[in-house]
Amino acid sequence: MTWSLYLVDDHAVLRDGLRALLEPAGFEIVGEGSDVPTVLAEIVGAPPSAVLLDLSLGEHSGIELLAEIQRRKLPSRVLVLSMSAQPRQVADAVRMGAMGYVLKGAAGAELIDALRSVLAGRHYWSAGIAAIAGQALSSAPARDPAPTLSLRERQVLNLVVRGRSSASVAETLNLSVKTVETYRSRLMRKLGVEDITGLMRYAFREGLLETDAG
């Protein structure tokens, strides 16, 4: 059986190595890249069986792509292949829907096994990752710290978590840049988060993202 696979990594030489490893093992590489908007458009247009995803993509983060795959309910299963074993990154990836997480120091045979497990609907975690992933999967949803957001707060939230700059948000909503930055700081304080990733997790968990946001 041949599975379609999309490679997302910002190092072309690594993608070449992955292609050489995975194609003989029965995986059809149907696309590759590192630019999140371009990759997302290609995946939406023709969802592969699985996405092999690095979390560090230069100006973007693999978490952004994971979040969009989850939001759009795409059928592609995601296996993270990363250098990082930082608990926060692992937990974020798991909560955003990653089916597995393999460290880049793993042997090729382990990566192949991990992909096959994920494609069969089973989770796969590299040694040292399992405990963090299990905790992320089993943790209860946090109590909502902000039962009510204003319409304007929701608009700012929608645009900020999509990676829009303060200037771009200001232009879209006809606000000053300073006002947008005030809204963003207020949202972080109100929701009890420290960064954009925290805002993103909250927005997806609570179903606050609008499909028609600019």
Image (cartoon, helix red, strand yellow):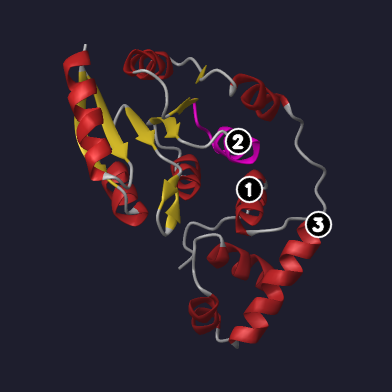
- Quadrant where the C terminus sits is bottom left
Question: Residue 44 in the image: x percent, y percent?
Answer: 32, 44
Label 2 crowd (10 A; few <14 / some 14-19 / many >=20): many
Residue 139 figure quarter: top right
Three-letter amino acid code at disc 1?
Arg
Q: Are marks 2 and 1 in contact (CB under 8 Å)?
A: yes
Residue 212 shown in magenta: no
Q: Is residue 107 left or right of residue 205?
A: left
Q: Residue at x 60, y 37 (%)?
A: 86
Q: Residue at x 50, y 31 (%)?
A: 98
Three-letter amino acid code at disc 2?
Arg
Q: In this orientation, does residue 35 appear?
A: yes
Quick one: SS at disc 1?
A: helix
Q: Residue at x 55, y 37 (%)?
A: 93
Q: Give the label on residue 146, or none.
A: 3
Q: Nearer the viewer, residue 1 or 197?
A: 197
